[in-house]
Image (cartoon, rainbow, N blue to C red):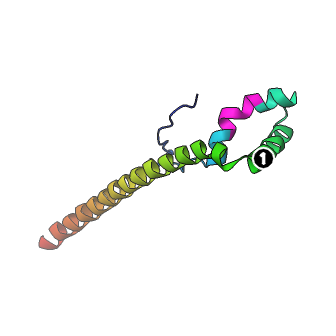
Amino acid sequence: STKERKVELSPSGKPKRPMTPYWLWWNANRMAMAQQLGATDAPSVAAHAGKVWSTMDPAERKPWEEQAAKQRAEHAVALAEWKRGKSGVENNEENVEKNENDCDEDR
């Protein structure tokens, strides 16, 4: 079973980029790949996973591609909200500075 992933935020509050279909599949199958190979070193497991993914049937990839598309759509919404909020803060700061300067000119 795969976990639903919420849009993660970086320390700046900007939404992190969503995972690709390969990374979603890789995270869900990493342990099985390691057991199948009998190896735990990351380079050999990753190389094997890359080979498996590249030869995988498009029908097998479809669920991962759909999940990635859903995450991309969620990310686009979260990013737009973040940009809107960020520009609102910047505009508000500029307005505060402008108003303070206007007050100084009146004196």
**Outermost residue, bottom direction?**
105
Instruction: Tell me what residue is drawn at x 40 percent, y 50 percent.
Output: 78
Q: Between residue 22 and residue 40, name the one nearer to us.
A: 22
Q: Position of residue 40 (x, y in %)?
A: 84, 30
Q: Between residue 66 and residue 19, name the one nearer to us.
A: 66
Where, quadrant-wise, is the N terminus in this rendering? top right
Q: Is residue 17 above or below residue 28?
A: below
Decide if residue 105 is on the left or right side of residue 17: left
The answer to whether residue 31 is magenta is yes
Residue 8 in view of the camera: yes
Determine the image quadrant of residue 107.
bottom left
Q: Is residue 51 above or below residue 30?
A: below
Q: Is residue 99 above or below residue 55?
A: below
Which residues lie in the magenta part?
A: 26-32
Q: How many marks?
A: 1
- Circle 1: element type: helix
Determine the image quadrant of residue 52.
top right
Q: Position of residue 4 (x, y in %)?
A: 50, 34
Decide if residue 46 is on the left or right side of residue 81: right
Q: Position of residue 69 (x, y in %)?
A: 51, 50
Please give the residue where the numbered disc 1 appears in the rendered image. Answer: 50
Residue density around tag 1, few if under 14, some if 14–19, many if 20 or more, within 10 Å: some
